[in-house]
Image (tube, rainbow, N blue to C red):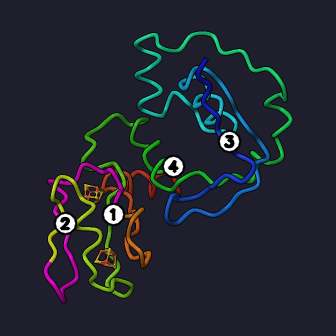
């Protein structure tokens, strides 16, 4: 029998894996079904599992059935869940799904902060579609028409120089909602 174990005594919140923070969750999740374990882990930190693309696909393909949680109850983690910080990219992209307009103008886009960039080129190496141009000694530039919004550059920049900025339409919608 194979069992997957999810170690969450100390989890990570915020913009992991590079820019997140250790987070005391105090949970261990074990299951023979990896989709069930991931679904429970996601719900445990108050994210909507339906918004996680691969879990949504798994549901649509009926890889996930009824999930029974045994042991501690989800409510036992309510205090930990209150302070869990959702990844910035996920928060920003929720507005995208709501509006259902072109992804290109709505989803968060990577922005390289020239004041923090050390011109090391790690971001360009991590960019699988080749959307980041890099030459030694020059701050890289991002071609948003090639960017697939995977945010690997944000996760892997060792100097925290890549931030995620809201897309054009999301910024406009945000301003309207803030009024
Ligand atoms: S990884 Fe970060 S510091 Fe290095 S070139 Fe890219 S943005 Fe600049
Ligand atoms: S988000 Fe992904 S595709 Fe876009 S520039 Fe960064 S690494 Fe490349």
Cα separation between marks 3 and 4: 14 Å
Crowding at mark 3 (Cα within 10 Å: few <14, some 14-19, many 20+): many
The count of marks equals: 4
First in sequence, mark 1 or 2: give its number: 2
Q: Is mark 1 within 8 Å of ligand 2?
A: yes
CA–CA distance in space, label 2 to label 3: 33 Å
> Distance of mark 1 from mark 4, alpha carbons?
18 Å
The foreground one among 16 and 173 is 16
Looking at the picture, does residue 55 appear above or below residue 145? above
Indicate which disc, 2 or 3, sits on the residue closer to the N terminus.
Answer: 3
Which label was assigned to residue 91?
A: 4
Residue 76 placement (x, y as % from top left): 86, 35
Residue 83 covered by magenta stretch: no
Q: Which of marks 1 and 3 is nearer the N terminus?
A: 3
Q: Could you say whether the residue bearing mark 2 is in a helix, strand or loop?
A: strand
The span from disc 1 to disc 3 (Cα, nearest Å) is 25 Å
**SS assignment at label 3:** loop
Few, some or many C-alpha atoms within 10 Å of disc 4 (few <14, some 14-19, many ≥20)? few
The mark lying in front, picked from 1 and 4, is 1
Q: Which of marks 1 and 4 is nearer the N terminus?
A: 4
Q: Give the range drawn in magenta.
A: 135-152
| 116 vs 156, nearest the viewer | 156
Mark linked to residue 45: 3
Secondary structure of the residue carrying tag 1 is helix
Mark 1 in CB contact with mark 2 (< 8 angstroms):
yes
How crowded pointer 1 is (Cα within 10 Å; few <14, some 14-19, many 20+) is rated as many
Mark 3 or 4, closer to the camera: 3
- The residue that disc 1 covers is 153
Q: In this view, does 121 lie to the left or right of 77?
A: left
Compared with 175, 116 (above or below) is below
């Amino acid at each position: 029998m194979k069992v997957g174990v999810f170690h969450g005594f100390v989890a990570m919140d915020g913009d992991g894996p590079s820019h997140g923070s250790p987070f005391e969750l105090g949970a261990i999740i074990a299951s023979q079904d990896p989709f069930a374990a991931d679904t429970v882990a996601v719900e445990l930190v108050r994210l909507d599992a339906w918004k996680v693309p691969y879990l949504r696909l798994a549901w649509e393909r009926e890889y996930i059935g009824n999930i029974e949680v045994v042991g501690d109850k989800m409510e036992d983690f309510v205090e930990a869940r209150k302070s869990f910080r959702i990844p910035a990219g996920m928060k920003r992209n929720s507005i995208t799904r709501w509006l259902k307009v072109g992804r290109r103008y709505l989803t968060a886009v990577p922005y390289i902060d020239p004041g923090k960039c050390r011109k090391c080129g790690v971001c360009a190496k991590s960019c699988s579609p080749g959307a980041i141009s890099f030459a030694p000694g020059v701050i890289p530039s991002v071609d948003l028409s090639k960017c697939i919004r995977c945010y690997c550059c944000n996760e892997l920049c060792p100097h925290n120089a890549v931030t995620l900025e809201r897309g054009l339409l999301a910024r406009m919608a945000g301003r309207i909602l803030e009024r």
